[in-house]
Image (cartoon, helix red, strand yellow):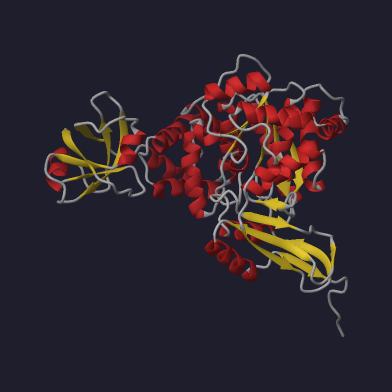
Amino acid sequence: MKFRVEVFDIDSGDISVVLNPYDCEKIGLHPGDFAYIVSTGGRRICSLIIVTKNVPEGAVWVNKRILQEMKLESVPEFLEVIPAGPSAALPIIKSKLSGKKLSKGEIRTIIKEVIERRIRDAEISMFCSALMVNGMDLPEIRDLSMAMAEFGEIIEWPYGPIYDVHSIGGVPGNKTALITVPIVASFGIKIPKTSSRAITSAAGTADVMETLAPVSLSPDEIVEIVTKVNGVLAWGGALNIAPADDIMIETERVLSVDPEPLLLASIMSKKISMGINKLLIDIPTGTEAKIEGLDEAESLATKFIELGKLLEIHTRVAITYGGQPIGRTIGPALEAQEALEALANGDGPGSLVHKATALAGIILEEAGIASPGQGKTLAIEAFKSGKAYEKMKEIIEAQGGDPNIKPEDLPVGEYKELFRATSSGYVTHISNKAIVSIARAAGAPKDKGAGIRLHVKAGDNVKQGDPLFEIYAESEERLSEAIIVARRNWPIRVEGMLLKVLG
């Protein structure tokens, strides 16, 4: 049935339209049902139905988000509303919750309905919970990865092999890709690095790179840039690669869960979409990292390697230290400053330089550029000589940024607060979780200039009054919030060598 279109400027958070109850009764719809909204040109989207008598009979209220999702350049005069019928995915999700193994077809049905918005957030939450409780075997995860990739864009390269390095995250300050990628690319290796924006962290790689150059690139632009300069640092969310993953990530964020099958499928689906042949996975491990124990890290590494075989992506895994922040900065602009300074000077914080060159070295060995055991040495040479810096300038320029940008050109928050040691001793612990909570309270990652600069690292000897860390914010209000969080959740532990006396 066709309805006259009226636009209302309210975003309910869902893809939804509003109808009069009389019209709903005529076409067999109820509040909370789903229906297909179809334009004259045949474009359609699945929408949640909201019912109110305020809508005139024969009319449908739509918001601007619906028009954007349907890619309609102007408001149409009429839209057709067709009942979508019951969800085919919901019974499958319920069966997974009871422990059933899912077939390839059942998994595709779930992903198709996630993409079409045919199931609600509550039902996606049920699917996440089912995976938390019952997990998936590797063939199921392979089918999930493939389905997530196939319902989005897939980049095809006119050459190969194509390399990538991906960290599972969980450690603040992880700006290593801004050093690893230009090192690898400087040797002629093709490495299109796509990253997510921060969800619960203070900065994703895309947030950091965006302070240097645009990261919202099309698939054609990525292929063109990599063909020209061998590397790119782009935001995956602009590419429509594995879009079901982006939808499910939002549910995971709300629930504060990260089921292992979705972690594996999320990463590998995006690698399928990007046409990656050779993959290096970085699993940071340590206290307050996403993966805390070495046994757990090795188990996850084995699953990545085996899953890679099933997907025909040659996968290696590096288990790295993640017990404290990497480098000395946390927050988009601050991290970009630190990475750019390190590249320009051929020097930088040990944790950042050693990790970035170690990862680059593994790829150089895999590509046959370096002999086994010599990759890191070659990577360090490219880093110290300025070869990697010159390549980074090429990448920045190819992505539409200023290749001559200096670290000091990047604006950081003008509102600052320095915290000092209240006693002398050794830094025995820096809390990853506290650092992230403070940086986010200061405004990161949305406020690019917000974040934290660390003046000490674990193991440092400090005296009373020495600087420990400094908070940066773009407003007084944000700085005040971050100061409160820092005082409630102190991030740096300073202790003497004597911990306790008994008896």
- Which residue lies most toward the top here? 158
Relative depth, front residue between 248 and 435: 435
- Which residue lies most toward the bottom here? 503
Q: Quadrant of residue 215?
A: top right
Q: Is residue 111 left or right of residue 306?
A: left
At which x and y percent is residue 377? 87, 32
Q: Residue at x 57, y 52 (%)?
A: 200
Q: Residue at x 59, y 69 (%)?
A: 484
At which x and y percent is residue 163? 68, 26
Count of numbered labels shown in the rendering:
0
At which x and y percent is residue 324? 74, 55
Relative depth, front residue between 234 and 323: 234
Q: Is residue 162 left or right of residue 443?
A: right
Relative depth, front residue between 222 and 416: 416
Q: Quadrant of residue 481?
A: bottom right
At which x and y percent is residue 178? 69, 37
Say if 252 sits above or below 234 in the image: below
